[in-house]
Image (cartoon, coloured by chain):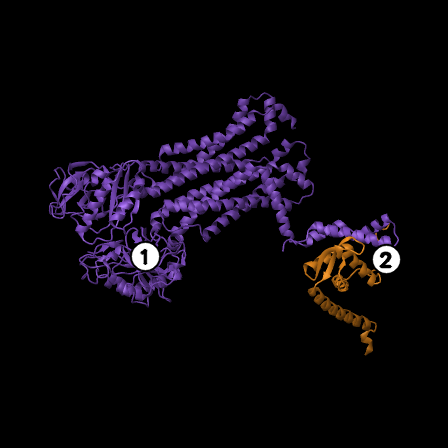
Chain colours: A orange, B purple
Amino acid sequence: MSTQDSNPDRIALLQGTLDLLILRTLLLGPCHGQGVARSIQRQSEEVFFVDHGSLYIALQRLEDKKWIRAKWGVSENNRRARFYYLTPKGREQLSDKTTEWQRLTRAVGLILDSGGKPQGEEV
Amino acid sequence: MFRRKRSEDDFAEEIRTHLELEADDLRQEGLNEEEARWKARRAFGNVRAAQERFYTSGRWIGLDRLLRDLRFGLRGLRQSPGFAAAAILTLALGVGANTAVFSVMDAVLLRSLPVSDPQRVVLLRTSRSPNNTGTIDSNATFSWPVYDALRHRGDALSQVIATGDLSSDKVGVRIDAEPETAEGDMVSGNFFSGLGVPLARGRGFTAQDEQDHTQTAVLSYNYWTRRFSRSPDVLGTTMFIKGVPFTIVGVAGPGFEGTEAGRSMDFWIPLQNRVEFNVLGNPPENGKLYQQDPTWWCLQLIARIAPGRTRAQALASVQPLFQRAAYVGLGAPMPHERIPVLSFADARDFPGFEEQYGKPLHALMALVALVLVIALTNVAMLLVARNAARQTEFSLRLALGAGRVKLLRQLLTESLLLVAAGGALAWCFALGATRTLARWALIESSLAPDRTVLLFALAVLALAALLFGLAPLRAATAGGAELSLRTSAAAARTDAGKTRFGKAIVSLQMALCVVLLVGAALLTRSLRNLENIPLGMNTDGLVVFGLNPQSLHSEPALVRFYQELQRRLRLLPGVESAAVMQERIGSWWSNNSNVMVDGHDPVLPAGAENLVRENDIGPDFFHTLQVPVLLGREFTDADNAGSQKVAIVSELFAKTFLPNQNPLGHQVNGLTIVGVVQNHKYRSMDEAPIPMAWWDYAQAPGEGGMNVEMRVRDDALAILPTVRKVVAQMDPNAPLIRPTLQRTQFEQTISQQILFARLAEFFGLLAVVLVATGLYGTLAYRVNLRTAEIGVRMAVGARRGQVVWMILRDSLWLTAVGVAVGVPLAMLAGRGLTSSLYGVQPLDALSYLLGVAGVAAVALAASAVPAARAASIDPLRALRTE
């Protein structure tokens, strides 16, 4: 019996991107952990695989940093769940990190795009 | 933050919710109940791992581990409360005693005056005072002209500060209606500013205060606290000192208690020029107060070396000035007179105490160090024994995969716990012991264990922690994991039972115990000798108190005052008799002089000196003390200023100065001898007999302050409130000064010996207890290890007596070695104690016998229980453990 859904198209999240994705998800409104996981998976068109254990650790880390806060509430299907909210500080972080991420991807994109043409031969 | 608010349960709950929500979603996607649950769980991965990560991410691991180790250690100690109590108490007593003695030593020998930049502050000393001068301390007091000359040499000494005693004792003050006593000094205007002593409230003195002799006073912080409960309203209030009103203008900073050795000042006033405030309260000589009288060397001087000068430079530049100033108003020095030489002494908190207490304190420190060594080795041994007994436990844990580091950490934690608990207790013990020591040493200044002492104690403790943590380590891990696999517990343990080290330690402890016991016996026997010295008088029911009536300034008024007082005191119920004397007997003080007998210098037997201790007394004095009058009579009310001048002398006086003749009718200093009394003690209990003479205070120029002796039936001190009332009716400003039992007064002169002997007894006892527990622990442990062996011996026919003897032989052997080492050590120690012994030789056989017998008794007592246990071992049961 296989031990894991081995979908070859899924990629593990880059270090630090999980935080960004959580914050982005919570921007849409308060959500519990399972909802966050589903949302990330769905929105990335099932490309990202979120390790649920790591997700909760990440949520706890963000809570400790006061970027998000949590409250026990009731889910849409009437289960008691812990809902996470974005704090003003978290909102600020999200915009900072988003800018940072965009600059990073642009830079990486630039390098990768130019990388196709060997530079030495242009001369 | 060591722990977040959120609990692990909360986190677990969230994960449970997650799994349910995920399962719900999966069900909606069409999976059946069981599949949905299973898939949700699989998608989550390892739940336990997530919880563990949650647990570890939120805290500082080291602390967490430490807490766990501590909890574990506490549990371990709780399982053996006897061991824990013994170890903690041993540590507390050992370290506490050390801290206390070190505190006193530090204060007396090492601590500087609490002034700013104390290295530049010096106490002025002189080799002697010029001929024909009077001093309070011939090496430490100076005349006004010397002060006046030195203080104008700012280039060498930036400050010269003068202080004068108001009295050799406390003085009478009145703040409310009731008169009280307090200790005060008269000081120059730069006293606070020059020493750099901060003021807690108000202001200090100025040069103007000194020049104008303002009636202002500064209180010590201590007195302010004690008498005024730190009331801020104290500034501006009036305080009557010797009946003269002074306004309180300031409170000195905490910790400063004046510059007088071992005395704690309550207040200071600027230098005064009134009759009441002549230094020591003496009557003016030839109508001159201390400021006009160059023959009276009565001021203590303190100087601050000018910046940029060394002590030697400063001294060299003021020396000629001093030697000139010393003879101002005295005329030129005599032809062969040795000129006084100025010197500087360190401004210690207790100058001069080095000579008096230095040696005993060092000896004490040595005693205490011995106790500490015994205590520390004891605890180490207790730990070794305990941990060796836990060998199987350790082996098992090693076998189960516990790291050696973990075991080491646990051992260290356990000893840390012991040391922390012992240290806390030791500190409490040290606080009390320091106070007691200071009281016994008659140091009035407040002594408390201070920061240096704390550091010292901590260093000792840290060493202890390391020692105790490491000592059992070898025993604990030497066995290794395979030990637990052996079938026989007894066989497993005998491997680790290498007790030669333990035996050596016990012998060492015994040796130290012998030293302490011999020392204690020597000092105790000295003390018995001292206490049984006949005083020559009957001190039962004898009460003494001082008086210094302020309202009287003429001699006849004084005499009338004391006559009236004596009359009123005699009328009190329970009072048998009362009499006055100038110098209080048993207080170290005496008036001394050389005498003329029958108009010329006496012809003295070989070895005798023309030195007589004298006292001014009133009628009924010897009757009150119950000193037998051998010849003639004592003074009566009929002896007065107008009648024949009379004197009384002691037996020894008569024998020395008027041998083989009837002394009655002879003249001493122009006074007629009318009585001879039996020899008795004057200054102290252990003084050698000295010739003594008494003058009638009604015929001698008096100075007002007198001491009163009262013979009282029943409870002697209970009479004091009544006496206070009687005195208050006669002079509302005159409190009773240092009222006490005459016996207590005399015992203060041997307080150092009492202190020393009591401490030695205490430490001796402590050593005995420690050694007994140590020996008991070791033997009990060994018997425990040999259970199987003893069982075999008994099974093959050993009798109980033989088994008991086997165990006893062990401890007797240890004792023999301990005594063999201890006796020579004790001889060395005894030689160090020689100066503190009275009537006992350092090689006193009885003391050594007592010491050795004591150790032997301890050894037998400590072995009795383990031996009995060994004898009662049931051979069958012992063998069954195999």
Q: Position of residue B272 (x, y in %)?
A: 27, 60
Q: Position of residue B138 (x, y in %)?
A: 26, 54
Toward the viewer: B100 or A121? B100
- Residue furthest to the right in view is B30
- Give residue B821's quadrant in the image: top left
In this rendering, is residue B152 above or below B561?
Answer: below
Specify the quadrant that holds the C terminus of chain B. Answer: top right
Using the rendered image of the protein, determine whether residue B679 is visible from the camera's viewpoint. no
Residues marked 2 and 1 touching at CB (< 8 Å):
no
Q: Secondary structure at mark 2?
A: loop
Residue at image mark 1: B239
Residue at 56%, 42% in the rendered image: B471
Question: What number is the disc on residue A7?
Answer: 2
Toward the viewer: B354 or A35? A35
Amino acid bearing label 2 = Asn
Q: Secondary structure at mark 1?
A: strand
Amino acid bearing label 1 = Met
Using the rendered image of the protein, determine whether residue A86 is visible from the camera's viewpoint. yes
- Give residue B407's quadrant in the image: top right
Residue at 43%, 37% in the rendered image: B764
Q: Nearer the viewer, mark 2 or mark 1?
A: 1
The 10 Å Cα crowd at callout 1, few under 14, some 14 to 19, many 20 or more, is: many
As drawn, is B412 to the left or to the right of B612? Answer: right
Q: Position of residue B462 (x, y in %)?
A: 53, 48
Toward the viewer: B302 or B489? B302
Q: Position of residue B562 (x, y in %)?
A: 21, 46
